[in-house]
Image (tube, grey):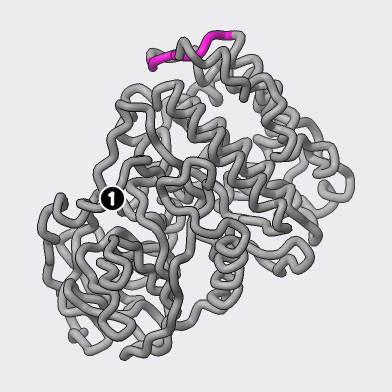
Amino acid sequence: MLDRLRRCVQAPFAFTVASGGVRVSFDRQLHAMRTAPRTYTADIPAEPLERYNPGGYHPVHIGDRFKDGRYSITHKLGWGSYSTVWLASDSKASRPVTLKILTADHERHPREVGILKRIRASLPGRGISDRTNHLCQLYDDFTITGPNGYHTCLVTEVGSISAQLLAERYSSERLPGWLAWEISRQITQAVIDLHRQSIVHADLYPGNILIASAEGQENLLESLPQPKRYDIHATKGHALTAHLPKYVVESVEIPLDTSRKSIVAKLVDFGQSFESSSPPSKINTPLVFRAPELLFDSRWDHRIDDWSLACTIFELVTGQPMFNNILPDKEGLTREWIAMFGPLPPAWAARASVTDSEGMDDFTPGEWLRECYFENERRTDFAEEHIEWLGEMLEGMMRYEPGERIEAQDLPQCKWFERNWLLGC
């Protein structure tokens, strides 16, 4: 019990570095900081500046124009392992857009573009204000050449903030019940729509859920403050090069008003996504959101998203991760699985480095959910009955055997997703 209660008071979400639509979780950032020498520094949190080299990030400055001047950079939104993300003005369509500039060496670029084009073809004409569409929409794509190589550029709709960062605003409490439920419902629909197209997202977690207001964005650029710029410093023995930008830009936060209960949640970042018929040999889903078959089996399909979705919904509702996310490792996660779901299947146990829970109390996902939700002083908008419904749903989604899991397409029939009981939350 004590081990579980310690996890109840951990940071509610993994630390993230920016407010744009692409994130790098704390464990990835920490690993990068520990394993890579610091050649360049800046006075604000920034993308790994050492990645401004051949094959890496493209140097971008405020006012830069792309695609024959059509897209003009106005602000920085964030960055990920394989991209920097910018707010731009589209002079042709007269609207703000998100411009994601991928690293020159990322081998998944063609696959990501192909996935986004398939989504666009299946949902024509739907933008950020369309409340029935919860998949990020690709407006345009093109390639640029720079000092670090050839870069694929993706132009998409503009959101506001990730669900991960939105939760940090409520860190002393947790997301209001209606908001956690609404985001969960909308992202479940996104997964359903994706799986209907035989596409697996493979990187589903709160950092890849973008939240926006359903209101128009016509005056967005005029409402934002001027972007802040900071010098880059070379450490001793190194010099600034043409591969670097002249300065780094502080990420801007797009305003979001949740008071009117009018939000749209979008599933973003399809860099890990694949077609069900062509799974890759390796997937980099954040460890604590990975389905067990990704660790112990060479075969997987769309049902890895169902497991990740369960972990995501748990986190949105309780305000904390389902599994220990403080420097997680495979052995510790496996022990948590065994404590929660029982012994591994024989074929997996033969491949695992640990096969017992090492003294942890046995408990079900529903028991852990109730403990995390009720046994602290945070807000409790849901009644015990509602949490019981959610626990039953999560337990059905999180079975070792993928064929035994409740799939996303069946979740709308679960009691948790019925609207009538939500009115009081």
Q: Quadrant of the N terminus?
A: top right
* Residue drawn at x 79%, y 65% as measured from the top left: 277
* Residue drawn at x 73%, y 45% as measured from the top left: 354
Horizontal and vertical percent position of residue 379: 39, 15
Residue that badge 1 annotates: 217
Q: Is residue 157 within the magenta segment?
A: no
Horizontal and vertical percent position of residue 163: 42, 41
Q: Report whether residue 30 is seen.
A: no
Q: Report whether residue 181 is seen.
A: yes
- Is residue 320 shown above or below 46? above
Q: Type of residue at label 1?
A: Gln
Q: Quadrant of residue 396?
A: top right
Left or right: residue 383 compared with residue 179: right
Horizontal and vertical percent position of residue 175: 40, 27
Numbered range of the magenta stretch:
378-384
Left or right: residue 80 compared with residue 331: left
